Amino acid sequence: MARAATTADTFNAVAEPRRREILDALTQGERPVNELVTLLGLAQPHVSRHLRVLREVGAVVVRDEGRQRLYRLNPQALKPIHDWVASYQHLWEERFDLLEDVLEDLKEEH
Amino acid sequence: MAQASSSTMDVTFPSDTEILITRTLNAPPHLVYRAWTTPELVKKWWPGRRGEMTVAVMDFRVGGAWRYVMVAHGEFEVAFHGIYREIVPNERIVHTEVMEMPGTAPDSEEGAVLNTVTFDGADGGATTVRIRTDAGSKEVRDLIAQSGMEGGVREQFEIIEELAASLT
């Protein structure tokens, strides 16, 4: 259960490098599992397990087409990550911009 | 005003426990260092545009403590403190950082991250500042993640940003 808890949110799901590779691959568009297996060079069960985690947090969506299961990204689920990084980034951008002002004053003193 | 020659800020995630912020500033390292280490100057930039900094205590020596407090526009206080671990004038500062939660003792190192700030001379008398934040362990990283921060996103940020931008 502890393990389930760690992957229950998008942040933790995306913290795993292989799962980020899967998301990368899916930015190019919808793909069947076997294509992901080839791209990642991982065994199919591993890829399926990662896909299941990504599906549980809503980061990917699956649909069946004939005998194929096609996966695609659901960017909406990644938005909380973007929002956090963006607010953190904006704070530091504000700081650096103000720091530039301070530095201009210091340069004039010389 | 920010100079046109300034580069933009870069955020990357070098490992699952680290965040790296990089920005080149249009001034030489010794001035950037001075702005970074002088309390009256720190007060001018550290809160960003989000409030006033009320406390900037800097016992600026190895083993010395620092504490920053700002009052955000929403009228709540945000406080951070830590210890200086390493000081190389004009080049590098290594310090711990604790975000104070209600009940956090001012000398507590629990949940501390380690920040390494480096100042490297760049072309045209500029300085490249790098702030590397290392949560150090999964426990601490998870602690930070629970407060809304996550260190495992790495270069994916750029892709995520594009995706999120397409939503708004």
Image: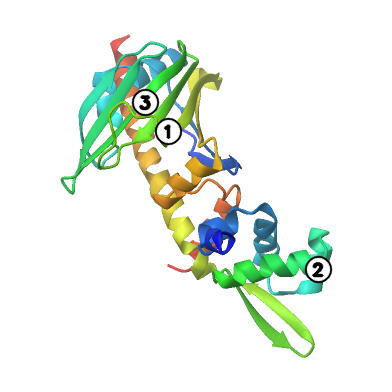
Counting from the top left corner in percent of width and height, residue B95 is at: 43, 23
Q: Which residue is mark 1?
A: B112
Counting from the top left corner in percent of width and height, residue B54 is at: 18, 30
What whole-number distance in Å separates the C-alpha atoms at marks 3 and 1? 8 Å
Chain for disc number 2 = A
Kindly identify the amino acid type of the residue bearing the numbered disc 1: Ala
Q: Please identify the residue farthest to the front as the structure is shown.
A: A1
Few, some or many C-alpha atoms within 10 Å of disc 3 (few <14, some 14-19, many ≥20)?
A: many
Query: Which element is circle 2 on?
Result: helix
What whole-number distance in Å separates the C-alpha atoms at marks 2 and 1? 40 Å
Q: Which residue is mark 3?
A: B82
**Residue B6 badge:** none
Query: Which element is circle 3 on?
Result: strand
Counting from the top left corner in percent of width and height, residue B60 is at: 35, 13
Q: Which residue is mark 2?
A: A44
- The verdict on a common chain for dots 3 and 1 is yes
Residues at circles 2 and 3 in contact by the CB criterion of under 8 Å: no
Q: Residue at x 56, y 52 (%)?
A: B158
Q: Please identify the residue farthest to the left as the structure is shown.
A: B75
Give the mark count: 3
Which residue occupies the foreground of this view, B24 or B49?
Answer: B49
